[in-house]
Amino acid sequence: MLTGVPPRSPKDTFITVYGRKPVLEALTDPRLIVDKIITADNARGGSLSAILAAARDRGVPVRQASAHRVKVLAGNGHHDQGVLADVVAPKMRPLPEYLEQLAQLPGDTPCALLVLDAVTNPGNVGMVLRTATAAGIDGVLLPRRGVPAIDPLVIKASAGVAFRAPVLRAATAAEGCAQLRAAGIRVLGLAGGAGAGQRDRWAVRGGARRAGRHGGHPDARRGGVAERGQRGRGGLLRAAPPPGGLTAANSAT
């Protein structure tokens, strides 16, 4: 059993939505729980009034901060439009917290996980979250570095599914995979140059895939199966970049 799970960060609890239209859409969606609204102290305009009215109707607290602080919190200095919302993501959690809960279940309980690594197109991230959630994947490991944050572009591409996707957080994909192996979860991998037979062999029930960008993944040097754990429930398939001729959109397929 894992112990010593650190306290959860707000970044592992909320999805921060910025921009006036996305914030208003979040406030008017009854399926979403908005924790708070933060507006820049110099923000003005009719659209802001609509946001404040919607927040008042739903009982969502509104806070003010400097324009610079809003940009920092939004993580985007060009499109925040002086307002952001923290939306509760009920299935998002740090990877150690997920593994701690998994350890409480019988040892033969299956799990299917997906790791995103260096998928830099927000549209692809959104489509992956949408597809994985629809497919019943237990968790999508979305590292804080190397993959876009869940922002309005990701949310739009996911058709709003990103808010309820089973997102797992770790600093990097490598750190997340190390934690999975330490928890006894099999980690499997394919190199980009592996033949179709090897790819099909590991695309099995109970496994999962690591989707990444093209070229340069260190596992690709090994050829074929890159890493293989010895034991554990289910598994995690770490897929290196696809062979040449494929576009980044294949990450979302």
Image (cartoon, rainbow, N blue to C red):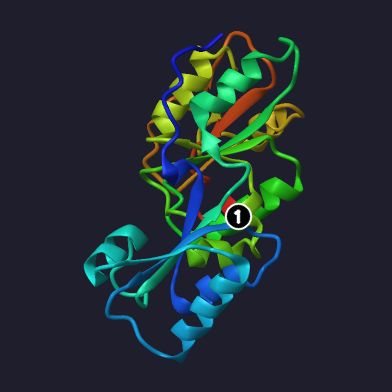
**Residue 108: x percent and y percent?**
75, 12
Frontmost residue, 248 versus 164: 164
Q: Tag 1's secondary structure?
A: helix
Rate crowding at label 1 as few (under 14), some (14 to 19) or many (20 or more) other CA atoms within 10 Å: many
Q: Residue beneath label 1, please?
A: 162
Frontmost residue, 74 versus 183: 74
Q: What residue appears at the point 33 percent right and 66 percent down from the top-left corner?
A: 76
> Can residue 160 be seen here?
yes
Side of 43 where 148 appears, left or right: right
Q: What residue appears at the point 65 percent right and 34 percent down from the top-left corner?
A: 199
> Can residue 117 be seen here?
no
Side of 161 where 227 appears, left or right: left
Frontmost residue, 72 versus 216: 72
**Residue 176: x percent and y percent?**
46, 28
**Residue 121: x percent and y percent?**
46, 60
Amino acid type, mark 1: Ala
